[in-house]
Image (tube, rainbow, N blue to C red):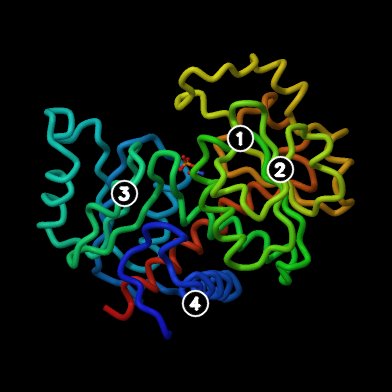
Amino acid sequence: MGYTLNHLLDIESTPVAALEDILDTAQSLIDDSADHRDRLRGRLQVNLFYEPSTRTRVSFEVAARRLGMDVVNVAAVGSSVAKGESLIDTYRTLEAMQPDVIVLRHPDNGVHATLASTGACLVNAGDGSRAHPSQALLDVLTLRQHQPDLARLRVLVAGDLHHSRVTRSGVALMKKLGVGEIRLAAPPGLEADAKVTEGTRTYDRLDEALDGVDVIMMLRVQRERLSGIDVPDSESYHRAWGLTPARLAMAAPNAIVMHPGPMNRGVEIASAVADGPQSVITRQVNNGVFVRMAVLLRLLEAR
Ligand code: CP
């Protein structure tokens, strides 16, 4: 394989060869209809989620089961976290039960690097506003299915970039793999930081940013993370920043529409677009299962 992969913490710390291998493996899992349940049979995955999740948690579980693994789900509510146990104590307690992999989502930036050990493989299922590497991988797999030559793509990411771990990991991966043009558009106060915008084109109006793009990735406003930022009400936001059929017509004729979910219909995206023929939002979800299978295979198959 030519690389070592003990954990998946973020895109930046993962070798390009590993990222490409995960994408290629995911696509070959999609293309064949074989039964893969013998590949990781009897291995154990623990899902430890301190924040709500539908797509990431369930697709990691589906991925593990399709590889024959056993899965234990631990939600912070209902565990000893509610009695004041720290993250490190909770993590080491679970690790002492010798799972092969722990999939962790946590609201604080950077916690995964402090936990990763020589014990279980650790997969970052989202930390604060910092990183969501498996989401970035499934998004880029979706881009590759639309245009295998990433250098030919113009991709727009629009919405609340400031609080978005999807943006940070997604833009990092698109840069690493050579996407032709990355455009970032955000309302005032919700712009990405300089590390993310470096090497991209930035916009403060959606209409200008949409001109001729091949891919539009819409993001919701993360109202649970706003502090002191004045964001317009949903109706006003939709008027200025919502992806409507009229706005979609400004993009390239065969442009695809993506959204990592959860969506706020009628806010950042109109239902007519989310459910329309150019939307690949459900394909992203489906790709998520195969990307997570590929992550598990690359972490565990050689161990
Ligand atoms: N895209 C994403 O992370 O969705 P969930 O919060 O439902 O996992």
Task: Tell which tag, 1 or 3, sits nearer the viewer.
Answer: 1
Q: Earlier in the sequence, mark 1 or mark 3?
A: 3
Q: CA distance from mark 3 to mark 2?
A: 32 Å
Q: Give the quarter of the figure containing the N terminus.
A: bottom left
Q: Amino acid at mark 1?
A: Glu
Please report contact status of discs 1 and 4: CB closer than 8 Å, yes or no.
no
Name the residue at 24% across, 31% down.
77
Q: Which mark is residue 191?
A: 1
Q: Amino acid at mark 3?
A: Leu
Q: Is residue 105 left or right of residue 98?
A: right
Name the residue at 83% across, 35% down.
207
Does the numbered disc 2 mark a residue whose Cβ is under 8 Å from ligand 1?
no
**What residue did someone put label 4 on?**
17
Please report contact status of discs 1 and 3: CB closer than 8 Å, yes or no.
no
Task: Tell which tag, 3 or 2, sits nearer the viewer.
Answer: 2
In the rendered image, the vertical position of residue 80 relative to residue 16, given as above or below: above
Task: Tell which tag, 4 or 3, sits nearer the viewer.
Answer: 4
**What residue did someone put label 2 on?**
202
**What residue did someone put label 3 on?**
104
